[in-house]
Image: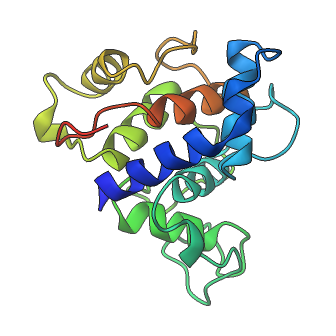
Amino acid sequence: MKSKLLSLFLAACMLCPLLAAPSYAAGDNAVQMVQALGILDGTNLTGAVSRAEFANMLVAASSYKDSISGEGSGYSLFKDVKSGHWASEYIRCAVSEGWMTGYTDGTFRPDQTVKLEEACSAVLKLLGYDSASLAGSFPSAQLSKAAALGLRDGISLKQGGTMARRDCAALFSNLMTAKTSGGQI
């Protein structure tokens, strides 16, 4: 299923005329591509990304993209995400698929910003990597693997850094050409 996801994205990338436009800088090219694929919206590229927004991006980058309604589900997995919350379905999907987790106190903290290591960990899980397949402990193992796969290319943040929308554009753009845990691109 994950190989189908990446194949779909690569096909979309090949069809996307924005990739061939020489007038864009490399960073703008990534932003334009990720926006064209529906993973990122808006124009404020310097704004910090919340956990709810990142869950939305993960789902938009997955094969579940068209199966989520974007409206409340009628139930909630977390005490701080009401069933009518705009991202409740995205959060439910991201958690159910194991890409993101909640906290031990029963919260998800949807408005909390996403840190580099959390984002890298979630995208690695989307690619099929689990903690058993990584050498070391969190977060160094996730950051190292993300760097080795090229997921961190174009992102200058260090551990603990807050992901901005431009950083997420680079991360998801890099996802399109990263190898899955099965070795496929």
Give the quadrant of the N terminus: bottom left
Q: Residue at x 19, y 39 (%)?
A: 131
Q: Residue at x 66, y 79 (%)?
A: 69
14 relative to 151 in the view: left or right: right
58 relative to 124 in the view: left or right: right
Say how many tags the image has: 0
- Could you tell me residue 79's position as x and y percent? 56, 72
User: For this rendering, which residue is in front, 43 or 13?
Assistant: 13
User: For this rendering, which residue is in front, 147 or 183?
Assistant: 183
Give the colour scheme of this rendering.
Answer: rainbow
Quadrant of the image occupied by residue 98? bottom left
Q: Residue at x 27, y 40 (%)?
A: 180
Whether 130 is drawn above or below 145: the answer is below
- Could you tell me residue 48's position as x and y percent? 73, 32
Does the rendering let one see residue 49?
no
- Could you tell me residue 157's position as x and y percent? 56, 13
- Could you tell me residue 81's position as x and y percent? 62, 69
Q: Residue at x 35, y 24 (%)?
A: 146
67 relative to 4 in the view: left or right: right
Does the rendering let one see residue 167?
yes
User: For this rendering, which residue is in front, 90 or 24?
Assistant: 24
Whether 52 is drawn above or below 162: the answer is below
Give the quadrant of the C terminus: top left
Q: Looking at this view, name the residue that lies furthest to the bottom.
A: 74
